[in-house]
Image (spheres, rainbow, N blue to C red):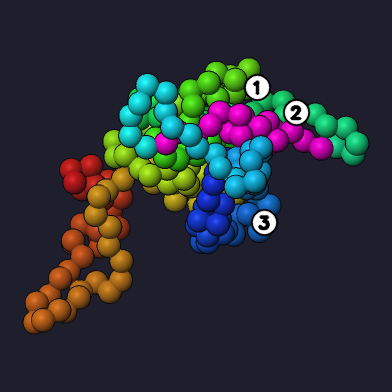
């Protein structure tokens, strides 16, 4: 599985994607993460990628062509002296009006070999970039939660995380994928009793019975 992030902040993304489980599976080459920055595809010496919006309004807008060229570079595969394109990539575009990203979509994305995540900044990306990208590969628009973020990096990291944990061999046991079993908002571990400021806090009795049907029923009620 290959993730390709289009971002102005590679260092921020890579800090997260180099840690914990995702960092481990990257080292094991079960997934790969590459980055392209639109700044590498501008025609000015300052690396400027934003301009004022047509029609007025607050903030700045990312220009279309640097984003398009960054995605185009991500989609290319170099084989010897030949340059070809990926057979079945998917491009993800983040938008407040996009579909809310859920476990269902995470399962679907796990079936792709290449996913390109376009991380916007400022007030967004010139809409013409999306129109051009649709000529490259399918584009799906997603929103991750109802909050407004300063950029697409946080949603992109959430998607990489959610998709990666669904890939075969990433988690120790299939049961570790919580959404595939009966989940609970409350979890407990050792010790059985915690003493804090003279008060005892115990693990619920049902969880100590070993009776799986009763435990599942308890979790369902939570």
Regarding residue 162, the answer to whether it shows in the image is: no
Magenta stretch secondary structure, dominant? helix
Mark with earlier residue (3, 2) = 3
Q: Picture quarter containing residue 89? A: top right
Q: Whole-percent x and y of residue 99?
A: 38, 26
> Foreground: 188 or 1?
1
Mark with earlier residue (3, 1) = 3
The N terminus: image quadrant: top right
Q: Answer left or right for 28 relative to 55.
A: right
Q: Is residue 73 magenta?
A: yes
Callout 2 secondary element: strand
Number of marks: 3
Residue at the spot 23% in from the left edge and 42% down from the top edge: 220
Regarding residue 198, the answer to whether it shows in the image is: yes
Q: Please determine whether, in this image, residue 21 is positioned above or below residue 222.
A: below
Q: Whole-percent x and y of residue 218?
A: 20, 48
Label 1 sits on residue:
136
Label 2 sits on residue:
85
> Foreground: 82 or 150?
150
Q: Answer left or right for 85 relative to 132.
A: right
Q: Which range of residues does the magenta coloring cover? A: 60-78
Q: Please determine whether, in this image, residue 36 is positioned above or below residue 123.
A: below
Residue at the spot 17% in from the left edge and 69% down from the top edge: 202
Q: Picture quarter containing residue 42? A: top right
Q: Residues within 10 Å of mark 3 (few under 14, many from 20)?
A: few
Q: Answer left or right for 127 relative to 80.
A: left
- Real-space Cα distance between discs 3 and 1? 30 Å
Q: Whole-percent x and y of residue 69?
A: 66, 32
Label 3 sits on residue:
28
């Amino acid at each position: 599985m290959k993730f390709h992030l289009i971002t102005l902040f590679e260092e921020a993304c890579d800090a997260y994607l180099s840690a914990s489980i995702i960092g481990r599976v990257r080292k094991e080459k079960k997934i790969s993460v590459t980055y392209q920055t639109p700044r590498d595809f501008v025609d000015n010496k300052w690396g400027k990628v934003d301009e004022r919006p047509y029609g007025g309004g607050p903030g700045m807008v990312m220009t279309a062509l640097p984003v398009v060229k960054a995605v185009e570079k991500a989609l290319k595969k170099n084989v010897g002296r030949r340059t070809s394109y990926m057979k079945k990539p998917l491009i993800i575009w983040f938008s407040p009006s996009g579909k809310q990203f859920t476990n269902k979509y995470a399962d679907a994305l796990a079936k792709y070999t290449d996913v390109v995540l376009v991380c916007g900044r400022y007030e967004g990306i010139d809409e013409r970039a999306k129109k051009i990208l649709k000529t490259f590969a399918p584009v799906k628009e997603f929103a991750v939660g109802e909050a407004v973020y300063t950029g697409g990096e946080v949603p992109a990291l959430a998607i990489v995380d959610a998709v990666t944990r669904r890939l075969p061999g990433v988690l120790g046991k299939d049961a570790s994928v919580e959404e595939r079993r009966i989940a609970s908002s409350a979890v407990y571990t050792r010790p059985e009793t915690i003493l804090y400021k003279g008060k005892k806090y115990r693990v619920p009795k049902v969880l100590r019975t070993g009776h799986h049907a009763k435990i599942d029923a308890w979790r369902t009620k939570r």
